[in-house]
Image (cartoon, rainbow, N blue to C red):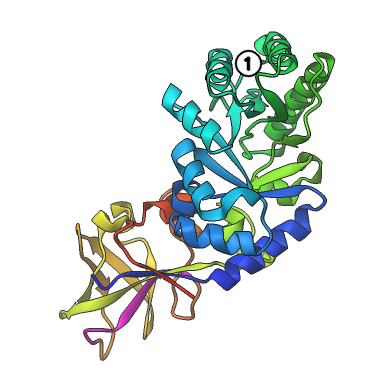
Amino acid sequence: MTARLHVDLAALTDNIARVRETVAPAELMLVVKDDAYGHGLHAVVNTATRAGVRWFGAFDVRTGTAVRAAAGDAVRIFTWIAASPDDLRAAITAQLDLGIGDAELLEELADAASDAGATPRVHLKIDTGLHRNGVRPEEWSAFVARAAALQAAGRIDVVGVWSHIAEASDAEDDDARAVFERALQQAESAGILPGVRHLAASAASFARPEFRYDMVRVGAFCYGIRSAGGPSAAKLGLRTIARLEAEVVAVQEETVRIDIGAFDGLPSSLSGRAMVGTPAGARRLGPLGGVQSLVETWTDAEVGDVVTIYGPGRSGEGTATDLAELIGTIGEEIAVRISPLIPRVYT
């Protein structure tokens, strides 16, 4: 395989600095789910730690424990999916912060913590309307009252209240924030005074200062992946950190064949729609095979020529989000589909 994903760690460092500057005084939580959005978990975590990041968002416990192994004890790691009692025990052992949005899971965590002789850090989640998970508003008062009782008994330490928002429209997000504000008031009435309140992800953290609270969870923007339909990375002051390339392996009359295909993570729906970068400028991406794909040819095309599927360059290619918009999805979906078998090359 000749395909490579080139990852610019200096650009990652610059993006982290830009995000931190924008959201200050709120803290940055760098989200590293899905192998750091396909860029490689260990390289991203090590770079971010050197850049001063002290909070990581890991999604699930397996990722959280991997971040702990990479970053050591100096960082806080937030994970919000624990699928089993084994997950809870592993999270407690790794000293992860746990997002809890279910009354039954709260009890299971308290029991696991008592068995382990530990006091886990907990962030309580209110469902503000996205319905990913979280406690419904009508059940929130009882939930926070129970959490306060468990905290008073020394079985958990409630350090945060949080939620997800859709970031689909200002009106919907305003409604979600109103639910979040009421949830904070009810938590305070129950005796819970969280040290970290977090609601916003990438887009809202830049565009809506009132959504930042104490911390923002930013993944895409730190990797230079803009929001679909939103301003360019350059307008946001960010740099795209990844460039996906593949070599020409055969030259035909009207097309060249490149060494990357649908099995490597390129959506087949991009066939005939996407423009890719070549030594002669932009050319149309043709049919995608399982392991190899066709590209419109150019004069003097040769085996070994490099074709850029997406990433920063001057050859006519777009960004991951440019590709995503062609097929009605988001840039993150393009990034995380890239096969882990494609080598990551770090600079």
The magenta-colored residue range is 302-311
* Image quadrant in which you'd find residue 155: top right
Q: x, y percentage for residue 272?
A: 30, 62
In the displayed structure image, the side of residue 27 where residue 287 appears, left or right: left
Confirm whether residue 216 shows in the render. Answer: yes
Taking the magenta stretch, the answer to whether it contains residue 178 is no
In the displayed structure image, the side of residue 128 where residue 306 appears, left or right: left
Q: x, y percentage for residue 265?
A: 32, 55
* Image quadrant in which you'd find residue 308: bottom left
Disc 1 is placed on an element classified as loop
Callout 1 amino acid: Arg
Residue occupying image coordinates x 19% and y 57%: 290
In the depicted structure, whether residue 313 falls above or below residue 9: below
Category of crowding for the residue at label 1, using alpha-carbon neighbours closer than 10 angstroms: few (below 14), some (14–19), many (at least 20): some
Q: For this rendering, which residue is in front, 23 or 104?
A: 104
Please name the residue that numbered disc 1 is placed on: 136
Residue occupying image coordinates x 66% and y 56%: 53
Residue occupying image coordinates x 48% and y 36%: 61
Residue occupying image coordinates x 69% and y 66%: 237
* Image quadrant in which you'd find residue 10: bottom right
Confirm whether residue 232 shows in the render. Answer: no
